[in-house]
Amino acid sequence: MVRVLAHSSYSSPASVRRKEKDEAMRFCPCFGSDEAKAIADRDPVLLVSGMGGSIVNSKPKTFGFTTRVWVRLLLADLEFRKKIWSHYNPKTGYCETLDKKSELVVPDDDHGLYAIDILDPSWFTKCVHLTEVYHFHDMIEMLVGCGYEKGTTLFGFGYDFRQSNRIDKSMEGLKHKLETAHKASGGRKVNLISHSMGGIMISCFMSLHRDVFTKYVNKWICLACPFQGAPGCINDSLLTGLEFVDGFQSYFFVKRWTMHQLLVECPSVYEMLANPSYEWKKQPEILVWRKHTKDGDNNTNLESYGPTQSISLFEEALRNNELSYNGKTIRLPFNFDILDWAIKTRQLIANAKLPDGVSFYNIYGTSLDTPFDVCYGSEDSPIEDLSEICHTMLIQYLSDQHVFA
């Protein structure tokens, strides 16, 4: 099931469910009309990807070949360690690669659509139709089938998802893409379609560049955006890492812990921590079964950490975290410089207001519960030192009454 909410004001909590599909989805003429394909003039559409939803290439700073490092299946983990592992620079606010001989770039081919279409466009992926990396592909094909033209009424915006959602390079890139779409379509306003974290980026842009947003945007269609954070996913990502594919395919992809060592240095991840100021019906928690020994007696209890208390948990659990790169050991504890940056981003998002005349649609699925709480250890196998969490294999995602192993 998909729920569509239309907001007259971005900041208002009052949302109403659309009663008719073609009313809620009027931004796309494919719905509710057999003559849609014959319509030649339409507002341009700009697709904005989410976390991990853009192809990223490694480009030598001097001479050499540009290599796709995200997403790839062949030698994925090795190339990720060599080319993408990064360190946060508090002086600039940017996440910088450990490899100083190259830089990460997002391709802008096919009017920005190439980077967000099939994330691994290799012949093998296309041959087996590996749907996990078919990101915006189906939507792009659908829109083209409805008469949208790439470079005239259809554009994409991929970006370096390691960086902060309010970093200057992304803000300028989004501004340029809106200007391009507006001009190419003959001066029409743009319909934005963002996925997941892309909605946070647009919120930042709307707050920082309200005049530009008002000038160029007609509608904003937001798909599954974690406006108040993604507590289950992000808490677990900072502690144990993240896998984008499951099953046997994970053996050909970036390993969970390899991904973890990047995410602890990514501002974008910290910006999706649970919002401690939001009035949750039930605050998201990190639950840990702990073992305490006193005077030779063992005691097991279940400890709970809310959005604010979880910071001390991250600090303790990651205090010894480090990686080895080119023979050097680099410490990667919980990064308080990034946290300070993320807090300012959260304030920026809270101040964002939808301009008058811009329609906003919030679309999200309801068939599956979103991971909300996470639990580590068990009553029979408790955790003694919090650093053990980072390498535990027993992880439970809890959402209301449901537990997912």
Image (spheres, rainbow, N blue to C red):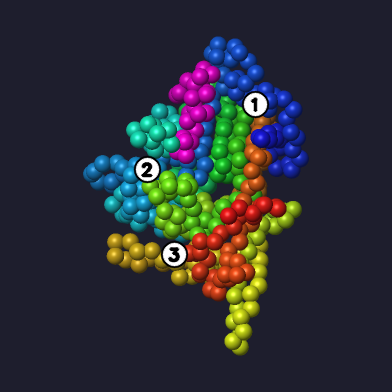
| Picture layout, residue 146 above or below residue 303 | above
How many numbered marks appear? 3
Question: On the image, numbered disc 1 is attached to which residue?
Answer: 25
Residue of label 3? 332
Does residue 371 appear left or right of residue 254 in this picture? right
Spatial CA distance of label 3 from label 1 is: 45 Å
Q: Is residue 329 above or below residue 297?
A: above
State yes or no: residue 149 in magenta. yes
| Residue 97 in view | no
- Say whether disc 3 or disc 1 marks the residue closer to the N-terminus: 1
Tell us which disc is closer to us: 2 or 1: 2
Residue 395 appears in the picture as rendered = yes
Residue 208 magenta-highlighted: no
Range of magenta residues: 131-158
Percent of width and height locating residue 201: 55, 43
The quadrant in which residue 353 appears is top right
Query: Amino acid type of disc 3?
Result: Leu
Q: Amino acid at mark 1?
A: Met
* Quarter in which the N terminus is drawn: top right
- The image position of residue 398, as x and y in percent, is 64, 55
Q: Give the residue type that dot 2 points to.
A: Arg
Q: Position of residue 279 (x, y in %)?
A: 73, 53
According to the picture, the residue beneath numbered tag 2 turns out to be 72
